[in-house]
Amino acid sequence: MSLRGHPIHETVTLPDGRGVEIEVGVVSDDYIRDRSDTVGVEVRAGEEVLATLNTVLRPEQELEARALAREIAAGLESGELKPTAGSIEPLADQAP
């Protein structure tokens, strides 16, 4: 399996009480070719996208993607991270 058809999902509650979902998976975008190898992170509160950014991960790195999602979730839940691309970007840019 890979992140191509099986994105990783984590759900957490922010310190302000909002529930958010974190998804790490292959980017699905009309502007990126169909067989993209770009793995992205998206943080949503309901239908509202709070943050979206690309990672250094490859589609076959499911364990690393799960670890990234959990690290982001823990940081958001504790308030150490904000639900913004700028806050999450340093984690997404770390080499696996």
Image (cartoon, grey):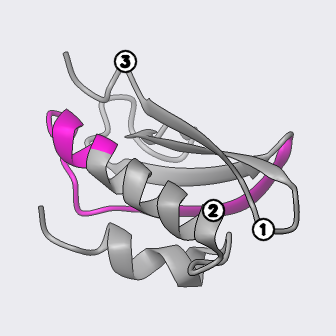
Secondary element type, mark 3: loop
Mark positioned earlier in the residue sequence (3 or 2):
3
Between circles 3 and 1, the one closer to the viewer is 1
Residue type at mark 2? Glu
Circle 1 packing at 10 Å, graded few (<14), some (14-19), many (20+), is: few
Check whether the beta carbons of the residues at disc 2 and disc 1 lie within 8 A of each other.
yes
CA distance separating discs 2 and 1: 6 Å
Q: Position of residue 17 (x, y in %)?
A: 87, 57
The correct choice, above or below, for 96 with respect to 95 in the image is above
Residue at x 50% of width, y 74% of height: 88
Which stretch is magenta? 47-66
Residue beneath disc 2: 77
Quarter containing the N terminus:
top left
The verdict on residue 93 being magenta is no
Q: Position of residue 19 (x, y in %)?
A: 79, 47
Numbered mark located on residue 15 in the image: 1
Residue beneath disc 3: 5
The verdict on residue 59 being magenta is yes
Check whether the beta carbons of the residues at disc 3 and disc 2 lie within 8 A of each other.
no
Residue at x 53% of width, y 39% of height: 10
CA distance separating discs 3 and 1: 31 Å
Residue at x 37% of width, y 82% of height: 90
Numbered mark located on residue 4 in the image: none
Q: Position of residue 43 (x, y in %)?
A: 64, 53
- Could you tell me how many numbered marks the image carries? 3
Residue nearer the viewer, 78 or 76? 78
Mark positioned earlier in the residue sequence (3 or 1):
3
Residue at x 68% of width, y 69% of height: 83
The correct choice, above or below, for 11 with respect to 84 in the image is above
Mark positioned earlier in the residue sequence (2 or 1):
1
